[in-house]
Every structure is written in structure tokens, then in C-alpha cells.
Image (spheres, rainbow, N blue to C red):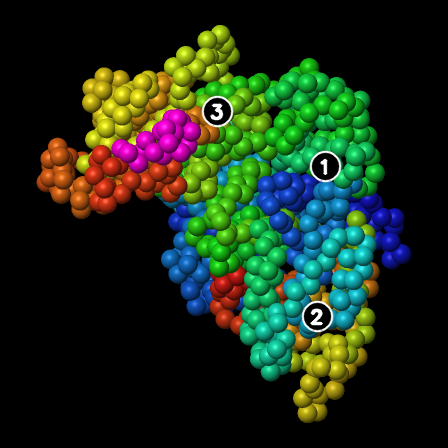
């Protein structure tokens, strides 16, 4: 950034306060703790509230304020009309104020249990957290929960603000006991710094100035602390370079630049760097900017680099210090915070965005979830909305990463649902699972092509899906017989030969159904690899699992056949009497009754069983395979 | 030496812009000629240097902007070398919609809200940068940096994606589009300080000068051209004023000021305590009016 010369009127940059530092913090606590009042008060005291808004505030305070005759600072914060009606804050909101030395960005997040998601979001970008408690109540379960969450997100400085001191007569004993309780707890978590401040947001005690009501308190005021606290950027600056490549800049044949934001370290022209995950090395040629080339750039800056050698670099790669690279792996242990109503399930596949890279991640074992109130580890088959757990992740390709506790940007990720595109979870990588490095693929000399060739066929997977009683097994069985009679090598996987063996440990909960289908898909994949024409006949009610199976195979080898039978007709047929049992409530989670069936959006083939016999349906499948070139066309 | 607040804000905005270009198909930058647009355009020139920003500028024109603004628009299109698209709602032209006959609410809805939707649909843009800041107005404080709109351009404040770290989920369903706000974390003061340090060109109306003013319901309205009907007995006075925000001239109130340089503007702001949107008539139409407008598709 250029600095202009002294202005004609004698103003200097220092007068104009153009060089402030920046502190981001978040606030945790509930409405009852007076959090909105505290933030409103800080905004008011820093002078950012304009006169016209103050006039409005006085009017509003009289009309809807909670304290007759006084200004209700909390009213400065309520942003959306829905919240104003409910009288609670429901989401993350961002506030800004500044002193002469520092600009502050406040992520204001509500404290109710169901809003773990919001608190985690607010804490993800914060340098420091303010945790509020009511002096009359002391350290509560929610205080511990908030502290754990912000610690989990990597915050190392916790500030416990003990509010409403006026309601306990500014008692030193009360404050000392709360401080003592809190430090005992918070030190276990491992914060680097813990500060406790006695305040009254309503009266303004110890917010800007030391209060005469607490002569026994020698620590900093809240604003004093925020203004002076050291922001720990120095550690990241001293770390090795991490530059996720965000965009390749190619305006003409003479310039090929790699644009990104430095998330650790510094970089200079001439530095030896490595591009990960490929591992290729080169040196930095230039740091090109609009204001001319830079001699150095450091963590926090968004820059464009050029490299000395023409090596392959694209979006999603990580440029690092050559002799201090990141780790590369495709299997991890991670903490995941779940943010969606539909639970996290083992075996399900999500998109994972980490840095500038997006990959697919399959959830492995869920080791445990964390009770955020007691911090106990409890076994968990799934994670629900606002639950936090530790699980394994398996990616479709290796990525370069650092553990989250080393770097938030190279170790933090979000999970995205492939169907809805919702952000369903956020996570923090702990470490790579060694398995990834030790289990190498054994290159086999006899490969899929050789195995298929000896059978003279093209291997495919025929994935039949539909309601119970739709006719999947009947049709699949007829097709299998036809193929066998044509000297094709086939195998049919169905409920009988899978549920009684491989999957006999699984029940019918949503999580078990996902795992059931995952195993079937993996077995089918191996059989296709063996050169077989494989059929699977399972309800497979969820789109996500069918898509997962599809992605396991090369394009064209997965053929989804939707056996389309209306529920009423399937229920009328009821060959095994299952619908009757389900209707009587003896069978839980029965597809079509109390568990959903997600209709295929684009199956390769749809069979309407109300319009044809099972034999005709089998003919349709065989004709389709001939048209596809999987089977030879019949002699004309 | 750690980075200053403006250096960090600049880096964040640039990162946001690059992410949009990397992950969307057809982005556009909404250019409204004001100081925030000026900063946003400047940041875009920096983000993609030495390439030109790989998207056009779009001005949704109401035909009622200040004359100085049209001059600035032409200058910036020329200097940036970027394509400038100007969209004027043909229905508004046909019906001669204007703030005097139709009032500010109808004028804004038809020219700006409808005009913007038409333009986005016409060109098929799937992402549009806007210069809005979270400090401007209460409902903005909770809006995400990447804010999704349905195919009908509606905003659902209850169903926003969480934004953690610097990670933005840009995936969208067919027909959906994204409004992106790279200046979300800037305040009005940050914008002025940045304009000062970077020497960014701004419309001269931001500086104090003697201008022909009539006072209407407490607002100082500048008579910028002959289209403004004067009420009986009303006569424009020359007054020393400047503008903190620029929109349609009949809907934008000036403030009395003697600040004729950037340092004077910054110092005036350090002392003055009136919000910048106070000069805007549209925010005062009804309670929660901005939130409602946004749900309907206003930027």
C-alpha cells in the first residue's frame, strides 16, 4: 500500500489513524448473561454509534426495552425482524468498532446448546474469545461448553467476563471464587492465557475505566485488554511457507502466476519451494503485484508468485518451503462438528473442501462423540446436528495438510452434501492414519482386462433398486438365468446371500443400511474387477449410497435399474408379509412406511412393473445390455 | 512487522474475489459508481494483476444518478479496460418511473430491484459482486459473504450456509445464483482510509463544495438537473455540502461540510457521529425495510 506524502493541510497518516492492528474476537454467552448489552455497550463506548441511531435507541428503549427508564444497549444488536420478535439472537452476526490503535471484528454468537454450529463458525476466525457468565450463577455447564468449543477451534486466549457484579454488591469473594473455579477447569483444557474480569455491562464498570466499585480488582479493564493483548501472528510468520494455490493467472504466454493467500511463513524471490502433493521443486522467481514486485511477502497477504521452472501447478496445490513440506496422506483422524439435521453416517461420502482443494471423503469408523457438557467421550454410531465427534476419513486422493493445531487453514475443512450442496459439517484434521502409507496397492500382472478377456465379456454392475416387493429379485434372477444361458459369467448378490453372512452383524437403522450398501458396493466392485457381470438386488433407498456405488466404478460400468412399482401395489403383493408387519408396528424403519425411499433421478433403465410381466422386464434388461454393447447383439 | 488492518482487509477481499473467479462460471461485478464500488473495483484490479479482472462491470442504471456519477462511470470503464454493461429496466423507461411521481419505494423497486433481476437473467450471471458492508445496516450484519439467491432471486435469511475460516462453499443448484460481498468486514472509515492511502478516484460530490440545495423534510436535496420539479416558493440555495453516500440524486441527502480533501473527510468522520445511510430515503419507508427488500431481491 502506498503512503501519500504529507497533505497540504498538515495531516499525517498518524493523525488519520490509518495504520491500526486488527483483532478478531468472538463472544459466547446467553441473552441472560447480558451479552448483547455488553457488546452494545462496547459499541456505544467506542463512539461508533451514530447520533441518529442513538436517538432511535432511546425511542426503542422506551418502547420495548427490558429496563424501564434506562437505555437498553442490547437493542443495538438485534438485526433481523424474526429475532426481534422472538427476543433472541439466532445466528452469527459481525460487529465492528475501533480505537485509535486497533480495529475489532466481533463475531457475536448465541450460547444455546442447539447453536454449537454458530459458535464454532464464529470462533473459527477469532484470535480471542470472550466468555460471559452471570456473577450470581458462576461457572455453569454452558460456560464449560463454550470454553471447550473455542479451545477446540484453536483459540488460545480465553477471557472470562463475570457480568452483573452490581447484583452481587461487587463482592470480591464472589469474583475470586468464580475465577478460581474457572481457572481450574480452563487450565485443564490447555489455554495459553486466561483472564477474568469483573464487570457490569449495564453500569459500565471495568469496561473502559477501572470501577470505583471494585477497588480490589487490579487487572485490566475489558477494553484495555482488547487494546493491548498481543495477537499471536508471530508464530505463523516463523513457520515454513504454506501457500494454497487459489487461481492460476495466465494473461498471456509470457506470464504464468500462482495466486493465493499465504497461510503460514514468508516468501522471497529465490526461495526454494516445493509443490504438493506432486513434490516437484523449483524456486520463486517474482512476487508480482499491482504496485510493483515485492521483495518479501508474509502470512496474511494475498499475492501472485511466478516460479523459475515450468512445472505443473494448479488450483488446489500447496506451495511450501522446499525442506519443510506439509504431510501428504489420504486417510485421517479428525474431529467433526456436525451442522445438519440429516446425521453423519459411517460409510457415507461427502465433498470435502480444505484450503483451495475439493476432494471426496468417505466417513470411516466414528470413534466416539464428545458430550460437550461433561467433555466425556461416548460411543456413537452417528453424529446428529450440533454433535461433535472423532472419526476417520478416507479421501479419494492424497492431499497436503498440517494438523489443525499447527495451522487452521491447512488443517481445517468443511464437508458438503453432494446432492443438496449444503455445508453439513466442519472438521479439524488431527493426523494421518499410518495405514495410508503402509498399505500400498499391489500392482497385479493379471488385471481386470485380462480377466474379462478370458471370459470374452465386458464386466458391469447391474444395480437393481426399488421398494420391498417391487420385483427386484425376481427380475434380477430371470436376467441372471438368461445371461448364464448365453455363457456369460455372472453373480447375483441379494438379501439372502449377503444379510446371512457378510452383513449379518447389521440391523435396519439408517446407519446400518448405509454400511450394508457400502459393503455390497465394495464386494460388487471386486467382482466386477474379477471380470464378472454382477447383479445386486437391494432396496438401497438412499440416493447418496447409490451414487457412492456409482463412483466406485469407471464410467459406464454402473447400470442403475429402477424397478418402479407404486407403494400400494408392492404392499398389495407383500410376498413376505413384511408390509403387514410394518403396518402393525412390529417392523421399524421399513422403507415406504416409516423410512423414505429416494427415487432415482436418472437411472440408466426404468422398469414399470405395472406395465409388463417379470419375463418381459428381463427381456428389456437384456435388450438394453445389447444396445449398450455389453452383450453382443442377437443375430439379425 | 505485522500487517495493518487495511492490509488484512485488502488481502481478505482479494481472496474472496479470486475464489469466485475460480469456482463460478460467469461472474459479474455490480458497479454503482460510489466510493464502495470504487474500492471494490480497485481491489479487483489488484487481485487479478497483471491480468484484467476476468468479468465485466454491470451498472443497473435508474437514469436518475447525479451527472458527476455518469462522468465517473465513463472514466472508470476507460481506465480499467473492463467491459461495462449498463442495464435500464425497459418497463421503467416505458412508464417513465421517477421518484417524484411514484415515490421512492416504487422507484427503487422497479428501477433497481427489478432492473437488477432482469440484467442478471438476461446475461445469465451466476455470481455477482456487490459492495455492501456489514456495518451499513442491521440486517447486513448477519448476511454471509457468499449469499445465495433462489432462481427467483429471493434471499432466505433462515437458511444460510455457515462460513468457517476462509472456506466458502460455492456450490449451487441449477438456477441459483450467488451475491458475493467482498467488503463485508470493511467499515465506512476503513473505506475512506483506503481511498486515501491508495489514491482511488472518487466522484467529486464526496468533497464539500457550494451546490444548489433545496431542503425537503429535513433532507438537503441537490437540484442536479432540470427534471427536478420545484414546489411553489421553493428556490435552490447555494450551500456548502458534500455527500457521504451516492444514489439517485432526488433520494440522496447531502450533509453540510467544509471537508474538501480526503484527510479533512476522515477527520470530519472521526468527529461526526451521524450514520451514512441517514441521507438515504429508502431505509425509512417501513420498519425492517432493508431486510424485506433483500428478501425480494434488492442487492
Residue that numbered label 3 is attached to: A395
Residue that numbered label 1 is attached to: A249
Highlighted range, magenta: A618-636
Q: Is residue B133 visible?
A: no
Q: SS class of the residue under badge 2?
A: loop
Tags 3 and 2 both on a single chain = no
Tags 3 and 1 both on a single chain = yes
* Vertical side of B154 occupied by A568: above or below: above
In the rendered structure, does residue B21 fall within the stretch colored magenta? Answer: no
Lower sequence index among marks 3 and 1:
1
A270 vs A206, nearest the viewer: A270
Residue that numbered label 2 is attached to: B65
Q: CB under 8 Å between callouts 3 and 1?
A: no
Task: Name which residue lies at 22% across and 34% down.
Answer: A615
Q: Quadrant of residue A463?
A: top left
* Vertical side of B127 occupied by A257: above or below: above
Q: Check the residue under mark 3 and report the chain it is in.
A: A
Task: Name which residue lies at 44% across and 50% down.
Answer: B159
In the rendered image, residue A416, in percent from the top left (x then y), is placed at: 46, 37
Q: Check the residue under mark 1 and report the chain it is in.
A: A
A282 vs A147, nearest the viewer: A282
* Vertical side of A42 occupied by A180: above or below: above
Amino acid at each position: 500500500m502506498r503512503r501519500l506524502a504529507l497533505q497540504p493541510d498538515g495531516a499525517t497518516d498518524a493523525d488519520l489513524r490509518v495504520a491500526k492492528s486488527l483483532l478478531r474476537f468472538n463472544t459466547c454467552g446467553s441473552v441472560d448473561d447480558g451479552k448483547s448489552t455488553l457488546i452494545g455497550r462496547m459499541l456505544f463506548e467506542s463512539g461508533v454509534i451514530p447520533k441518529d441511531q442513538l436517538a432511535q435507541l432511546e425511542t426503542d428503549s422506551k418502547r420495548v426495552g427490558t429496563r424501564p427508564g434506562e437505555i437498553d444497549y442490547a437493542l443495538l444488536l438485534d438485526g433481523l425482524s424474526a429475532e426481534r420478535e422472538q427476543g433472541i439472537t439466532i445466528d452469527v452476526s459481525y460487529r465492528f468498532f475501533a480505537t485509535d490503535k486497533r480495529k475489532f471484528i466481533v463475531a457475536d454468537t448465541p450460547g444455546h446448546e442447539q447453536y454449537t454450529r454458530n459458535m464454532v463458525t464464529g470462533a473459527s476466525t477469532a484470535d480471542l474469545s470472550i466468555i460471559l457468565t452471570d456473577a450470581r450463577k458462576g461457572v455453569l455447564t454452558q460456560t464449560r461448553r463454550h470454553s471447550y468449543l473455542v479451545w477446540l477451534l484453536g483459540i488460545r486466549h480465553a477471557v472470562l467476563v463475570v457480568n452483573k457484579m452490581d447484583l452481587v454488591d461487587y463482592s470480591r469473594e464472589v469474583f475470586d471464587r468464580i475465577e478460581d473455579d474457572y481457572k481450574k477447569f480452563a487450565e485443564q483444557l490447555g489455554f495459553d492465557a486466561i483472564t477474568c474480569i469483573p464487570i457490569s455491562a449495564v453500569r459500565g464498570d471495568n469496561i473502559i475505566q477501572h470501577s470505583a466499585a471494585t477497588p480490589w480488582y487490579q487487572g485490566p479493564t475489558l477494553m484495555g485488554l482488547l487494546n493491548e493483548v498481543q495477537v499471536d501472528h508471530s508464530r505463523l510468520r516463523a513457520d515454513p511457507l504454506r501457500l494454497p494455490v487459489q487461481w492460476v493467472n495466465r494473461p498471456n504466454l509470457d506470464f504464468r502466476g500462482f495466486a493465493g493467500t499465504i497461510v503460514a511463513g514468508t516468501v522471497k524471490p529465490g526461495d526454494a519451494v516445493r509443490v504438493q502433493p506432486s513434490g516437484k521443486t523449483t524456486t520463486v522467481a517474482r512476487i508480482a503485484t499491482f504496485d510493483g514486485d515485492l521483495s518479501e511477502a508474509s502470512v496474511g497477504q494475498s499475492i501472485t508468485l511466478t516460479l523459475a521452472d515450468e512445472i505443473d501447478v494448479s488450483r488446489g496445490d500447496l506451495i511450501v518451503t522446499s525442506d519443510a513440506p506439509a504431510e501428504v496422506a489420504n486417510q485421517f483422524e479428525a474431529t467433526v462438528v456436525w451442522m445438519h439435521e440429516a446425521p453423519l453416517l459411517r460409510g457415507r461420502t461427502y465433498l470435502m473442501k480444505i484450503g483451495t482443494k475439493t476432494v471426496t471423503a468417505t466417513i470411516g469408523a466414528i470413534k466416539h462423540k464428545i458430550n460437550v457438557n461433561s467433555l466425556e467421550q461416548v460411543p456413537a454410531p452417528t453424529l446428529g446436528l450440533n454433535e461433535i465427534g472423532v472419526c476417520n476419513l478416507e479421501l479419494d486422493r492424497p492431499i497436503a495438510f498440517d494438523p489443525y493445531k499447527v495451522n487452521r487453514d491447512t488443517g481445517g475443512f468443511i464437508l458438503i452434501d453432494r446432492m443438496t450442496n449444503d455445508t453439513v459439517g466442519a472438521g479439524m484434521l488431527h493426523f494421518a492414519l499410518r495405514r495410508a502409507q503402509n498399505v500400498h496397492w499391489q500392482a497385479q500382472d493379471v488385471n481386470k482386462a485380462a480377466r474379462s478377456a478370458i471370459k470374452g465379456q465386458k464386466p458391469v454392475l447391474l444395480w437393481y433398486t426399488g421398494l420391498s416387493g417391487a420385483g427386484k429379485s425376481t427380475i434380477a434372477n430371470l436376467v441372471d438365468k438368461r445371461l448364464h444361458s448365453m455363457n456369460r459369467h455372472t453373480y447375483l448378490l441379494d438379501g439372502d446371500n449377503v444379510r446371512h453372512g457378510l452383513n449379518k452383524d447389521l440391523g435396519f437403522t439408517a446407519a446400518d443400511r448405509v454400511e450394508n450398501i457400502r459393503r455390497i458396493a465394495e464386494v460388487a466392485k471386486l467382482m466386477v474387477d474379477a471380470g464378472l457381470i454382477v447383479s445386486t438386488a437391494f432396496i438401497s433407498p438412499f440416493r447418496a449410497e447409490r451414487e457412492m456405488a456409482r463412483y466406485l466404478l469407471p464410467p459406464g460400468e454402473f447400470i442403475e435399474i429402477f424397478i418402479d412399482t407404486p407403494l400400494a401395489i408392492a404392499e398389495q403383493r407383500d410376498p413376505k408379509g413384511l408390509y403387514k408387519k410394518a403396518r402393525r408396528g412390529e417392523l421399524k424403519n421399513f422403507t415406504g412406511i416409516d423410512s423414505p425411499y429416494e427415487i432415482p433421478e436418472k437411472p440408466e433403465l426404468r422398469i414399470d412393473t405395472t406395465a409388463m410381466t417379470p419375463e418381459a422386464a428381463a427381456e428389456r434388461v437384456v435388450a438394453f445390455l445389447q444396445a449398450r454393447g455389453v452383450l453382443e447383439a442377437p443375430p439379425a | 512487522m505485522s500487517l495493518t488492518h487495511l492490509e488484512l482487509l485488502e488481502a481478505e477481499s482479494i481472496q474472496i474475489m479470486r475464489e469466485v473467479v475460480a469456482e463460478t462460471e460467469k461472474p459479474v461485478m455490480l458497479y454503482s459508481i460510489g466510493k464502495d464500488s470504487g474500492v471494490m473495483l480497485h481491489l479487483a484490479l489488484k487481485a487479478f494483476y497483471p491480468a484484467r479482472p476476468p468479468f465485466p462491470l454491470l451498472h443497473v442504471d435508474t437514469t436518475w444518478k447525479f451527472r458527476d456519477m455518469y462522468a465517473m462511470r465513463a472514466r472508470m470503464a476507460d481506465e480499467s479496460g473492463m467491459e461495462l454493461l449498463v442495464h435500464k429496466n425497459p418497463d421503467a423507461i416505458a412508464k417513465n418511473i421517477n421518484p417524484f411521481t411514484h415515490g421512492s419505494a416504487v422507484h427503487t423497486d422497479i428501477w433497481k430491484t427489478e432492473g437488477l433481476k432482469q440484467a442478471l437473467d438476461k446475461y445469465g450471471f451466476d455470481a455477482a459482486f456487490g459492495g455492501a458492508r456489514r456495518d451499513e445496516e442491521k440486517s447486513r450484519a448477519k448476511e454471509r459473504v457468499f449469499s445465495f439467491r433462489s432462481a427467483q432471486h429471493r434471499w432466505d435469511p433462515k437458511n444460510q450456509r455457515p462460513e468457517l475460516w476462509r472456506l466458502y462453499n460455492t456450490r449451487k443448484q441449477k438456477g441459483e445464483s450467488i451475491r458475493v460481498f467482498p467488503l463485508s468486514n470493511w467499515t465506512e472509515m476503513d473505506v475512506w482510509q483506503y481511498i486515501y492511502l491508495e489514491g482511488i478516484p472518487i466522484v467529486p460530490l464526496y468533497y464539500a463544495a457550494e451546490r444548489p440545495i433545496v431542503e425537503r423534510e429535513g433532507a438537503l436535496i441537490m437540484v442536479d438537473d432540470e427534471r427536478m420539479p420545484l414546489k411553489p416558493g421553493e428556490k435552490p440555495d447555494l450551500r456548502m455540502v458534500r455527500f457521504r453516500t451516492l444514489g439517485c440524486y432526488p433520494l440522496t441527502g447531502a450533509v453540510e461540510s467544509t471537508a474538501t480533501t480526503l484527510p479533512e473527510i476522515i477527520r470530519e468522520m472521526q468527529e461526526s457521529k451521524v450514520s451514512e445511510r441517514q441521507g438515504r430515503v429508502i431505509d425509512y419507508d417501513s420498519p425492517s425495510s432493508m431486510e424485506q427488500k433483500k428478501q425480494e431481491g434488492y442487492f
